[in-house]
Amino acid sequence: MTEGEHTEPLHLLAPDGSLSEASSALPLPPQLLEPDLLRALFRDMTMARRVDTEATALQRTGELGLWSSCLGQEAAQVGSAHAMDERDFAFPTYRESAAAWVRGVDPVALLGLYRGTTHGGWVPDEHRFALFTIVLGAQVLHAVGYAMGQQRLDSGGAAIAYFGDGATSEGDVHEAMVFATVTNAPVVFFCQNNGWAISEPVHRQTTVPFTQRAAGYGMPTMRIDGNDVLASLAATQWALEHARGGSGPVFIEAVTYRMGAHTTSDDPTRYRPPGELEYWATQDPIDRLRLLMINREVAAEDFFVEVQAQADALGERIRAAVRGAEDPEAGLMFDHVYASDHAQVERDRQRWSAPFAEGGVMA
Amino acid sequence: MSAAPMTMVGGLNAGLRASLDHDPRVLLMGEDIATLGGVFRVTDGLAKDFGDQRVFDTPLAESGILGTAIGLAMAGFRPVVEIQFDGFVFPAFDQIVTQLAKHHYRSAGHTPLPIVVRIPYGGGIGAVEHHSESPEAYFVHTPGLRVWTPSDANQAYLGIQAAIACPDPVIFLEPKRRYWDKAEVALGTLSADDAERMWSSRTLRTGSDITVVAYGPMVRTCTEAANALAELGVKATVIDLRSLSPLDLDPIFASVRQTGRCVVVHEAVETVGLGAEIAARVVEECFYSLEAPVQRIAGPHVPYPPSRFERHYLPSIDRVVAGVVQVMAG
Ligand SMILES: Cc1ncc(C[n+]2csc(CCOP(=O)(O)OP(=O)(O)O)c2C)c(N)n1
Ligand SMILES: [Mg+2]
């Protein structure tokens, strides 16, 4: 693929639910239209959206300190995460809750980070899904290093790095592209361009499509409609195969939109131009898949009712678990600072558990 | 001069506005500072009033922000950069420590870099990881940087102007948990002498039993602890350092010579923190006046924990009171 050919993002599934002609730029493997797969994609996007709605509600009632919603970005995340196989490993930002869902991370565990009970919440190896990374761009280098490791292990696996449009300006992301191309590392750069980095529009970060930059570093690129779950899945499958096969890194720009605020602390009315949200509401990723499934008679009303019921049950489970969660015991904050014993930590653990009268710090 | 009750956010905004008005070389740059007015709204309205050549959003890259600020300073401007949160200053750490801090020294005094790096810091707001840290010791440890931190709205208003007027690079640490606290702000122009005086510590109350040293967010905690101590019959002197580099310790030594006792309070990790430096200096200068070991009340040797732990982590009024009572018994 060469850059410059396509300025319009590639898509397979249009907002009206129709399929477009697969092109050489973005082939549509026939397996992508298997009814079971379409149903799974629909279910995962719906469940992810339910997690998101529930988390937003829990933040509003004070159960969570913060939430960063992925509303509108479900197709980009669910499609790309579905492309992973058991050898691959994902490196997310803080917004990849839909990808986390696909990787089997329990939403209740994930919400621990936002409730403030943990800085992690899951075992990365169990899900082949790294911990959320808040420092923009840092995880992109980790993905490249992980991919360099797969070369040495000859595992045939690849890494996928998630990051936003804003994060592309960080030096770490550029260094990651340098390392990936000169080492020919099996890594997929998956940039979700959701239009905004908090209040800064994309043109504050770049004057050309992000894919053009990546091409300059020397890797093939694809710019896709990020609200099209089939495009996201097809492109990422293609990219991961390319990487696993020893042909080096690939850069995907998924053009999507952040339908919510940046986080629950943000007020987008201060910067979002009128009409933008309304336009993107017509591009909804779940609606268009539903239309396709109805057109192709892959699912009928009973399926959609069943998925909705599952989503509601999930919402209730999350709400009950988060509301009922006890605060962790204070002493736990001294655990795992180091992998081996450390004198300062142990001294402070003692002082923090003893009252002042006994030389401790507890009042 | 007029006085007005303001939050610290308002005081900072007014101070930045005064500096922009007063000196055309002053520029404000950072992430989300223009249209949004900053995630804490410290720069609210300034882009509108001063235009996008003077108040502007940068690409999302902290090393880029600091590096270009250095170039702008070399071109004669006085950049005031905003780092969005404490935990995000580290991509810029290289530019700050290897370039910003050393340039005046390397150029044998020919090229000062009058840059202010504003950083909201500290915990207590229930935030997620990297949004509650106290990185001051890294900067205080670096020769060539000045470090300053306000404890209330008026101090913020005056201090930000003094920092901008200063020919040296200043790391300006804003205690975010005090952003919404209100105080009377004495509006008006800061004279050169006023600005110079901001680099000193300030005694908030005088008591003969013990000297309590604090800065930034812990000043209010310590003042409230001193009120509680007064009810227990313990008379505390409370000193707000304000300037963390240079340290103005003479008033502390003078006080400790009277009280014979000293505690230093900060949120940052105790190990090799400001308290260690101050305790060492107090021992050097006041050894024969001391009636008890200097006590530090600070963070334990763990990363800043998830927010549900922060009430255990942060020095509270109770912890300060209990620490003082313990030193009084010593
Ligand atoms: C190094 C660093 N600087 C600043 C921030 C504060 N911050 C958090 S998210 C964000 C915007 C990120 O935008 P983008 O990369 O487009 O991702 P999105 O939030 O849109 O998913 C900023 C500035 C941060 N987390 N890390
Ligand atoms: Mg974005």
Image: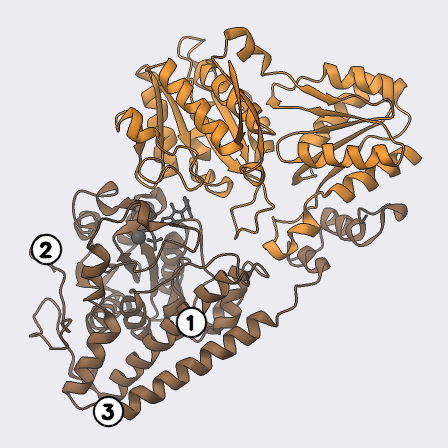
Chain colours: A brown, B orange
> Distance of mark 3 from mark 2, alpha carbons?
36 Å
Residue at 46 percent of width and 42 percent of height: B88
Cβ(mark 3) to ligand 1 < 8 Å?
A: no
Position of residue A115 in the picture relative to residue B40 (left or right)? right
Q: Is residue B300 above or below residue A77?
A: above
- Residue bearing the label numbered 3: A300
Give the letter of the chain under mark 3: A
Element assignment for label 1: helix
Frontmost residue, A291 versus A19: A291
Q: Residues within 10 Å of mark 3 (few under 14, many from 20)?
A: few
- In the figure, residue B270 lies in which quadrant? top right
The amino acid at mark 2 is Thr
The amino acid at mark 1 is Val
Give the letter of the chain under mark 1: A
Give the letter of the chain under mark 2: A
Q: Earlier in the sequence, mark 3 or mark 2?
A: 2
Residue A274 at x, y = what percent? 21, 51
Element assignment for label 2: loop
Q: Is residue A311 above or below residue B288?
A: below
Residue at 33 percent of width and 65 percent of height: A71
- Residue bearing the label numbered 2: A7
Q: Is residue B212 above or below residue A144?
A: above
Residue B267 at x, y = what percent? 66, 39
Element assignment for label 3: loop
Q: Is residue B315 above or below residue B183?
A: below
Q: Are marks 3 and 2 in contact (CB under 8 Å)?
A: no
Frontmost residue, A359 versus A71: A71
